[in-house]
Amino acid sequence: MTHLIFYEKPGCVGNRRQQALLRAQGVVFEVKDLLSTPWTADSLRPFFGDKPVAEWFNASAPKVKSGKINIHAVDETQALSMMVQEPLLICRPLLHYHDLQQSGFTAGVVLEALNVILEPEKDLQSCPKDSNASVCEVTS
């Protein structure tokens, strides 16, 4: 049995769309609340792999969109510290499958291991409520 853990923001429209695609492709998963999980820098870091630090962030998070946080000016330690304190900043979903982890609903080690087929013409990463989102989604 597949044991994928899907960390979501409860109520997120984008996460619901992503979960629907997984179900349609026969992927069984457990949903957990990204915002209430007690993250540490060590538990969070593996989800980002070798992505640039700026891609770890939810580009639609209010502090990122407003410019309060310049995601291109923070280092790994700063980013992890901010995300532990405020998980809304994390690019989601976070996906954990056996020993594989990834952030975002784009091609990556977890979706590849599960043989999930992403349709290039369907953007399931950006927020459907924010057509300007370039990396991750957020809903109120």
Image (cartoon, grey):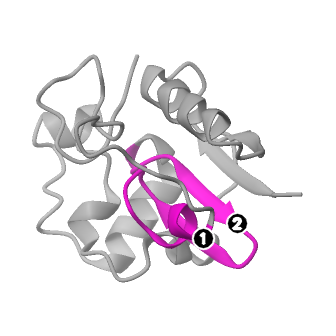
The quadrant holding residue 129 is: top left
| Image position, residue 80 (x, y; %) | 43, 68
What is the span of residues highlighted in magenta in the rendered image? 89-113
The residue identified by callout 1 is 113
Front residue (pair 102, 83): 102
Q: Residue 97 carries which label?
A: 2
Disc 2 marks which amino acid? Tyr
Which residue is more in the foreground, 3 or 44?
A: 3
Residue 38 location in percent, x, y?
70, 54
Residue 99: in magenta span: yes
Q: Which residue lies furthest to the right in this view?
A: 1
Q: Quadrant of residue 137?
A: top left
Residue 65 spot, x, y in % from top left: 15, 36
Quarter of the figure that contains the N terminus: bottom right
Q: x%, y% of residue 88?
A: 44, 40
The answer to if 73 sits in the magenta stretch is: no
C-beta proximity under 8 Å, tags 2 and 1: yes
Q: Is residue 96 left or right of residue 11?
A: right
The residues bearing labels 2 and 1 have C-alpha atoms spaced at a distance of 8 Å
